[in-house]
Amino acid sequence: MNRYLIHMSYLGTQFRGAQKQVPKAFPDQLDRETIQGNLEIGLRRLRPLNKPFVVLSSRTDTGVHALHSTCHVDLESKSGKPFDSILILSTLNSYFNRCHLDIRILNVVPVNNRFHARHDAIKRTYFYRIAVTQSTSSLSPLIAFTPVEERRRCHFVTTPLDINHIKEAASLFVGKHDFRTFMETSKSHDKITRKNIDSFEILPGNSHIIQSATEFQPGSIQDYTKYTYWDFVCTARSFLHKQIRRMVGVLLSVGQGKLTYRDVKFMLQIPSKHSWDTRAVPAPPHGLYLCKVEYRPESLHNNKLEQ
């Protein structure tokens, strides 16, 4: 049996999330509506002796995207020799293309059998894309014009945002805190809610279609100037369920003047589901991207390659 680290990207719009969702009584049931399920179906095309079980590094929710995510899987070939990494990559991408699935395998790397895609990750970086209208028209800009290529890939905000206030409030999240207030209600009673946020930056963003569209559609490109794009970039080893979307929702409320710096501080200092301020609404999933999962080089080391 050999273990492989798979690097991948995907658009979450057509999936029910990353993690396979099947009844516990039927663990081998195929799931064509999740990232994990489709990976396992695609890996069966290699005809391994074992049933592939994919372990995800990050279990993103329905509608959340990934520019770079990872998983690991154990495979045993009929010959007893390791599968070629290129064969795994090409087999999966061929399956995804044929089934019109928005998943792409970026790389496949043999790793040691002690490696764990989720537990060995030392950092995960997400960013949340915001587009803020610049229009002063009484007609909603979402009705007047919304770039079709950004549909379900960016969160459009119709009210002005005070970015300076947002940056000030975002600084509160950096460091080690109990984020119980920012966690989706969980049935688990032993959830570790203290997390260390390495960084939380608010950076200028853009719509990548602008550069190419300028050359071919100079008459309509002025519509794109109705929006200012911002990326909310957050890095930590791990996050609670829906923590990032709830933090972004709070920051947007601060930028809109619904919440203050002190309100955010209170939610951190009094960690409880009852401390959540209902003037804030969790940001929708389609603006969130997992963009990097990092490991220590020594955790990837494959001793078998040296034998």
Image (spheres, helix red, strand yellow):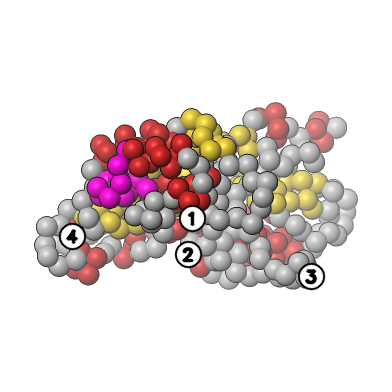
What's the amino acid at mark 1?
Answer: His
Q: How many marks?
A: 4
Task: Give how far apart the Cα atoms at labels 1 and 2 are.
Answer: 8 Å
Q: Is residue 136 left or right of residue 91?
A: left
What's the amino acid at mark 3?
Answer: Ala
Upstream in sequence: badge 1 or badge 3? 3
Upstream in sequence: badge 4 or badge 2? 2
Q: Residues within 10 Å of mark 2 (few under 14, many from 20)?
A: some
- Residue corresponding to mark 1: 65
- Residue corresponding to mark 3: 25
- Residue corresponding to mark 4: 223
Q: Residues within 10 Å of mark 4 (few under 14, many from 20)?
A: few
What's the amino acid at mark 2?
Answer: Thr
Upstream in sequence: badge 1 or badge 2? 2
| SS of the residue under disc 3 | loop
Residue 115, above or below 78: above
| SS of the residue under disc 1 | strand
Task: Give how far apart the Cα atoms at labels 3 and 2 are.
Answer: 28 Å
Viewer-closest of 276 and 147? 276
Q: Start and end of the magenta stretch?
A: 250-261
* Mark 4 or 2: the one toward you: 2
Task: Give how far apart the Cα atoms at labels 1 and 3 are.
Answer: 29 Å
Q: Residues within 10 Å of mark 3 (few under 14, many from 20)?
A: few
| Residue 163 found in image quarter | top left
Please say if the residues under marks 1 and 2 sit with CB atoms less than 8 Å apart: yes
Task: Give how far apart the Cα atoms at labels 4 and 2 are.
Answer: 25 Å
Q: Position of residue 9 (x, y in %)?
A: 53, 52
What's the amino acid at mark 4?
Answer: Asp
Let me know if residue 163 appears in the view: yes
Q: Is residue 307 left or right of residue 181?
A: right
Task: Give how far apart the Cα atoms at labels 1 and 4 are.
Answer: 26 Å
